[in-house]
Each structure stands twice: as structure tokens, then as C-alpha cells.
Amino acid sequence: MRLAVGCAMWTHKAWPWHSVPAADRLRAYAGSCDAVEGNTTFYATPSPVTARSWADQVGPEFRFVPKFPRTVTHDRRFSGVEKDVRAFLDAVEPLGSRAWALWVQLPSAFAPADVPALGAFLRRLPRSFRYAVEVRHPSFFEDVTAAGALEQVLTASGAEWIPFDTTEFFRTPPGSDAERDAWTKKPRVARRATALTDRPIVRYLGRDDPARTVSGWQPWAETVAAWLREGRSPTVFVHTPDNADAPELARRFHADVRTRVPALEPLPRPVAVQPDPIETLRLF
């Protein structure tokens, strides 16, 4: 029985390990969280050497969910992308089993009519990886037929549907600069809590107020607890607009689920980090 939790990135200026050497920040992050979203691969495919360095900094049960390059999903929309896909798959191969799922994030313009193209793309991918898809077009959350067609395509490929739950975030108007910025960028769709595989993945966006974030995730704590009892192995990523408290909140979510499923092993205590003396000197 395992629940992994993490954040959108492994370093942030507000986090304690931001003061350690850059090459050690992932290792320090992995002392608090055991999963991370791979947003950087959306913008640039890393070298296999870089991916190997990531794998070397974390334990064998750590979960990466790297995102397919935007050239594949947004710019070319699965057409003529063989070279980019091959480069991406070769790049993440050194992660081995740590590559928990490869993430196909689709733009809001990706509509139900585009689902056959997604299905053809997924069928061409090697079975040596698991895949997860995030959609943002409102029709997939409002039209039962559209949702069913997408589920059918995903199930045929053994792929998961990643929900990005922003319902708590959009419940009331923004109250900070970070919230106002996120207000214009984040998708506003209905909450979806159906797992298609034994590896459900959830992205949850709260507020900069930790109490609001915790209150808003209570339905997810119940859902994730139920998944664990069913024998699934979920991964939950906790976001807030400024992400300043995201690692602590991710750990708190894990503890919250554990109150419902006592058999769930607790996360290890966070590893203390030693600041980089050069970075420390720069503060003075």
C-alpha cells in the first residue's frame, strides 16, 4: 500500500533546500516528498546524462511524472513528431521504474473531435512506459459522451486520466498577486475523481491560505483513501498559487489520508539540509 505525494517542482526560493548547491536540490527535495511533476521536460528535453543524474539523487521508489515536450502535444498536435518523441523517450529511459508515468498534457483547444488523434498517438508508444493524459476542454467535464469516448481511448492503451482540480481555488476571488496571476492561467473545469488504472494521479490546486487548501482537499483525502483500500497506488501533487508551503502541505495531505487508512506507512521525517556556504555569503 503506497501513496506518493509531491509538488510541481523540486526547488523554489521559499524552500529550505534552495540554499544548497543546485546539483543537490533534487536529493534534498526527495528527503521530504517522494514524487515530482516533470514540467521542465515540456520546454526542453533533457539529455540522458541529466536524467541519469536525477535518478542517482533519489531512491528507487521515487516517482517522476515527466511531461511530453510541447512540440508534440501543443505545436504539432501529434503530427510529424516521431523524432521529438524518440528523443524524449531516450532521454527519460535512465529514470527506469522511477518514471512512474509519462504525462501527455493537452491544450484547452484539444476537443472531443481530436480524441482519435490521441488514440493513434498512444497506440504508437512503446509499452515499456505507462502514460497519463490531462485534458482541459470543458466538454470532457460537461458532456458524458465526450468523457466516455476519451475514457475508452485511454483504457485501450492502459493510460490514466489526470484531473487538475481547481474547484477550491476558483471558489472565491483571488486575494494575492500570486492568486491573481493563477486566476488568469489555470483551467476552470469540474472536479473529476474516477481512476482508470491502478496508478491514479491527481493534481490539486489550493489557495495561498493553508487552511483553505486543507479544507478543499478533504474530498480527495476520502477518494485517495478509497483507492488505497482498493489496492491502487495513487500519486497526488499539491499546488498553491505561490507554492511556498507546497512540500509541507503535500506531507500533510499524506498524513491526512493516513488518518483514514492507518495501515498506510508514514513518510520518513524530512532530511535536514546543509546550506551552501557560497549562497549564504551572498545574503550578506
Image: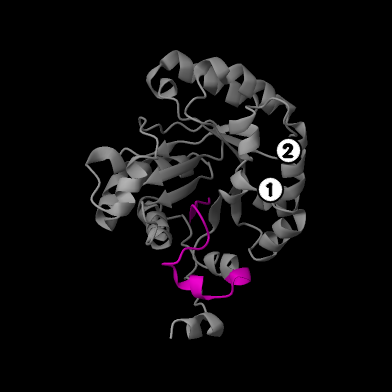
Name the residue that disc number 2 marks: 84
Closest to the observer: 226 or 148?
148
Residue type pointed to by label 2: Asp
Q: 96 or 174: which is nearer to us?
A: 174
Please tell me in which quadrant of the rendered image residue 155 appears.
top right
Provide the secondary structure element on which disc 2 rests.
helix
Mark 2 vs mark 1, CA separation in Å = 9 Å
Neighbor class of circle 2 (other Cα within 10 Å; few <14, some 14-19, many 20+) is: some
Residue range (magenta): 1-24
**Residue 119: where, in percent of width, then height?**
64, 22
Give residue 34's position: percent from left, percent from top: 54, 58
In the rendered structure, which disc, 2 or 1, sits on the residue that comes first in sequence? 1
Q: Is residue 71 magenta?
A: no
Residue drawn at point x = 51 percent, y = 63 percent: 11
Residue toward you, 22 or 129: 22
Q: Can residue 168 be seen in this view?
A: no
Q: Where is residue 208 in the image (x, y as percent from the top left)?
A: 30, 55
Q: Badge 1, how many Cα within 10 Å: few under 14, some, many 20+?
A: many
- Which residue shows up at 33% across the image and 52% down it? 178
Q: Read off the residue under disc 1.
A: 45
Which SS class for mark 1? loop
Whether 213 is drawn above or below 114: the answer is: below
- In the picture, measured across the screen, residue 100 lies left or right of residue 173, that is right
Q: In this view, does 49 lie to the left or right of 137?
A: right
Q: Do the residues labelled 2 and 1 touch (CB within 8 Å)?
A: yes
Residue displayed at 45% across by 55% down:
263
Q: Is residue 185 above or below residue 112?
A: below
Q: Quadrant of the C terminus?
A: bottom left
